[in-house]
Each structure stands twice: as structure tokens, then as C-alpha cells.
Amino acid sequence: MGAIKVIVLRELRIYFRDKSYVISSIFRPVLWLLVIGFGVGSAVAHGKGPSYSQFVLPGIIAMALLFSSVFFGMSIIWDRQFGFLKVILVSPVPRESVVIAKMLSGAIISTFQGTIVLCMAPLMKMHLNVFQVVATILIMFVSSMALTSLGILIASRMESFEGFNLIMNFVIMPMFFFSGALFPLQNIPVFLKWMVLVNPVTYCVDAMRYALLNVHDFSIYADCGVIFGFMLIVGLLASFNFKRN
Amino acid sequence: MGPMIRIEELVKEFKAVRAVDGISFDVGEGEVFGFLGPNGAGKTTTISMICTLIRPTSGRIEVNGVDAVRHPGRVRRMLGIIFQDPSLDERLTAAENIEFQARLYGVRSSEIAPRVKELLELVKLDDRAGSRVKTFSGGMRRRLEVARGLVHSPRVLFLDEPTLGLDLQTRQLIWNHITMLHRIKGMTVFMTTHYIEEAVICDRIAIVDHGRIIALDTPANLIASVGDDIITIETVDTETFADAARARFSVDAAVFDGGVRITAPGGAELIPRLLREIPVPITSVNLSKPTLNDVFIHLTGRSVRDAEIGASDRMREVFRHAPRRRR
């Protein structure tokens, strides 16, 4: 337990110390929210229910979580390259603590970013109660744990950061676009529907939409089941791979 | 009490190559033990096995009586390691790097601050405690790594090529720090180097080549095994001096490069006697000892530098057969 705390504190210290990095990591989702929410939103007709900018808010939060978590998980490549991981590996700290600590740190950092985006809710004329905010933060946290382990899993298969663009284009971007983050799922074509259904991010978005706007495509139990299941499977795979290497 | 480190018939194979080929040795408590040999001789592989980073193919490793393969956690606790490649966190400060290490090894919170302070003072970095490591020079980083390796009071400190890539002056400084820390802390030190001149600070040296130990003794004995001292004398009459030396002391004396070159055991004792008993005025005397490099030449028929050229081919071989480096 102690070791996990030590590693988490190190990660948080590094992240929050670099102010320019903190600001730029928050800037992107906020920019997206403004451009997509209000820009695209103004071109989208809406009848009853939430406006497009309200609808897209959980999607943008999911985007923030996805980018930040997977990237954070992959940062283990740097730790390896700069020898810092070796320092941890020769210490008495159990291997799995390293993975758990990374998952927790990624989740804390991503949830922080997601929460900043959530703070934009009043701009979308959303009035949230405490329960809605707490529920959303919990969903963010668990989703980020899952996505960070995905990053660690990818990193365990990579020697260097050279393949990062590949991962960006073929993993992160599709997971974002095929998630229902930007569009409702009711009238989409069949091929898209399948892509969306097998994408775990879909369920994160859906769960947050349920918490924030009380609209959803799946039951909250299905959402939570997928998020937890994804976290467990990928988390176990990540620590298995990490230990084996 | 047994030795601090006991290695028996240790073997590590990487697919086609035997990087470590059945080595055995003991390291006593408090000893400074050196692994000397060219790059690719198996030094780092051996250290990685003792530090439980890689598993041996066969053989036994005991640290303070604990089996390193069966109880890696207990062994790790007793070791401090300074890796060949830098491993500091550049984004943290000097003090934070040491503090992080202390916490990883479960040093009690109340003890951390005084230890960090003490170690930074010892390596003369106390004035930079709050600076981030990315602003440090190579020598400062090395010193910080040495300090960090000691924060949990390890029983054994491993130094894998601690001065690689540093300039001569900085190397000297690093060794001063290491010998001083050894004197103060009294831990066992296990070091590898391929800078021959640095190995002389060891109590004992194992000379390794092609994954095997080809000699193991004190530096003095290793050098003595090569043989005699070399005395070079310049005199006004070299021929007479050489003849007299041969006749009276039955030593090997030759006229060489305008001087007399005498090869004999116990050169330091011989010089005053030569000067006293041979009535030829001399202009200069030079006594040189065989070096550890001469030992390596003596044992392998080639110098460490020459061996490195061959060794780099060997390393390429290793990596060709093991494309994914295992941690």
C-alpha cells in the first residue's frame, strides 16, 4: 500500500508541477467543447430534451479522459527509457503495485481534467445537483482507470514512443469518434452501430449522459458492467504483461 | 559468518550466446570487489542477475545467506544499485529523487529528511538540493545517483560502470566520493569497470572475459603474477652500468633507448642498492610497475581495449538473437 502511495504522489507531483502541461491538457477539451458544442451545436436543430452543447458535454469529458489516460499509461515507456522504471523494479516494491499506482495516478489526473470540463456545465445552461456531480466524477474515475491500463498494456508492447502516432490514429481517435460522444446513436447506419457497440468508451459516455442529462441508450447497469469489466480485463492483462517483461 | 555474496556456477544464456558461462565467487562483508573486463564480457549480466532483474539460466546466488532466485524481495531490500545508464527522474529535484528512493524502500518518514540532507552533503550537492535534475551536469548526476543508492543503508552497493562517459577529472571525483562513502558506511561494494586504472581501489578483482572469471585476486597479487618491476636508469655510461648490474645483482639489464632497462622483482628495494654499489653517476631513475592492463594482456594475450573491439561484435550477436530486450 505504502509503495502505491509513494508512486502516485510522484506522478501527481510531476504532473501538477508543470503548469504549461496542465494548462495545455485542459485547453484541448475546453476548445473542443466551445467549437463543437456551440459551433456545430448552432447548426443542429433540436426539439425537446437537451441542446446539442449539453448533449456533447459528456462526450467531450470522455474525450479528455481517453486522451489523458491512454497517454498517461503509455508514459511508462518514458520511465523505462530513462531508466527510472528500473529503479522501481530493483526495489522491494511488488510489480503489481507499480501497475496499480500508475492506474490510480492516471485516473486522478484524468478525472481532474474531466472535472474542469464539467465545470463548464453552467455555460451550457445545465444546473447540476451534488449527486449528479459526484456520480459523474465516479464514472470518470473508473473509466480513467480502465483507459490508463489500456495505455499501460499498449506500452508493454512498445519499445519506444515512435509508434505513438500509430496508436493515436488507430486506437485513440477511433475510440473517440465511434463512441456516441458527438452524435446520438438512434439513427446511425448499421456498420457504425457495431463499431459503437463494441467500443467501451460508448458506455462511459452513456453513463455520464445518464448522470448529467438523464438521457441514455443503455441501462446504467449495462454501462457500469462494461466499464468495470473492461477495467478488470485490461488491468489484469496490463499487470500480467508488465510482470512478464 | 558466511560471505555477503556467494555465487555458484552461475550461467545466463541468451538464446545462442552464453553471456555468463559458469562463474563462482564469494564477496566478503565490507569488501570492495571489482569485476574487470571488456564490454560484453558478462559483467552487467552478472550484476543484473544478482540484483534479481533477470533470472539465471542455472546456478545459485546468495546475498547474505538469502537465495536471490527464491526470495527476490528480501534480496532487493539489501541492495543499492547504481546503474550503468542514468536513471534519475529529471523532472524531480535532487532531494526528491533521494526521498522517492527512501520511500520505495520503506525508510521511516522521520528518518528521511535527515538522511537526504546527510547524503547530499556527503556528495557535495547540498546547495543544489532543490534544483531539478535536468539542470545537472553528468558528474553531478552520477554523484546524486551514488547518494540515492545509499539512502536505504544497503548491505551491498552495486556500481555498474559508475564513471562511464565522464571526463577524467569527474571520474576521479566520483571515486573519491565512493571510497569516502565506503569508509564512512562500511557497506560491501561490488563494482564493474573497464577503466583498468579504476579497478586498483578494489580489495579483490575478478577479471572476466567471455563470461568466465579468468583470474581472481588482490590487485597487488594480480600484478605480481605478471612478474617484475621495470627500472629505467639514465646514466653517463649506460654500458658499464648495465654490465655492473648484471654482474652484481644477476638481473636482466638491457641498454634501451639511451638508458638502462632493468627488469627485476622488488624494484623499489633494488634501486638504492644499485645506486650505492655501482659507481657510475646517473642522471635519472624511473621505476614502473606492471599495470592491471599488463595482467589482462598476460592472461588473454590482448589488451582490454583490443578485447572491446571483439566484444562489440559479440554484443551484436547477443542482440541479434534476442531482439526484445528483457527487463
Image (spheres, coloured by chain):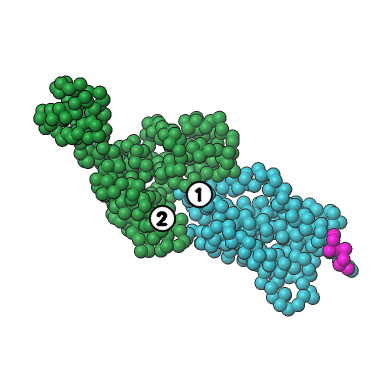
User: Residue A29, position in %: x, y?
Assistant: 75, 56
Which residue: 77% across, 54% down? A30
Confirm whether residue B29 shows in the render.
no
Is residue A39 in the magenta section? yes
Q: Nearer the viewer, mark 2 or mark 1?
A: 1
Q: Secondary structure at mark 1?
A: loop
* Type of the residue with mark 1: Gly
Q: Position of residue B295 (x, y in %)?
A: 26, 43
Residue A17 found in image quarter: top right
- At x 53% / y 38%, what residue is drawn? B137
Residue A58 location, x and y as percent?
76, 61
Please state if A89 lies on the left or on the right of A18 as rendered.
left
Chain A drawn in what color? cyan
SS for callout 2: loop
The colour chain B appears in is green
Cα separation, mark 2 vs mark 1, equals 15 Å
Q: Is residue A24 left or right of residue B74?
A: right
Q: Is residue B27 left or right of residue A137?
A: left
State the residue at coordinates (22%, 35%).
B256
Residue B39 visible at all: yes
> Which residue carries the number 2 mark?
B54
What's the magenta region? A38-46
Q: Where residue A83 is drawn, which disc sits there?
A: 1
Q: Is residue A185 above or below residue B35?
A: below
Whole-percent x, y for residue B211 in the image: 32, 54
Residue A49 placement: quadrant: bottom right
| In the image, residue B107 lies in the stretch drawn in magenta | no
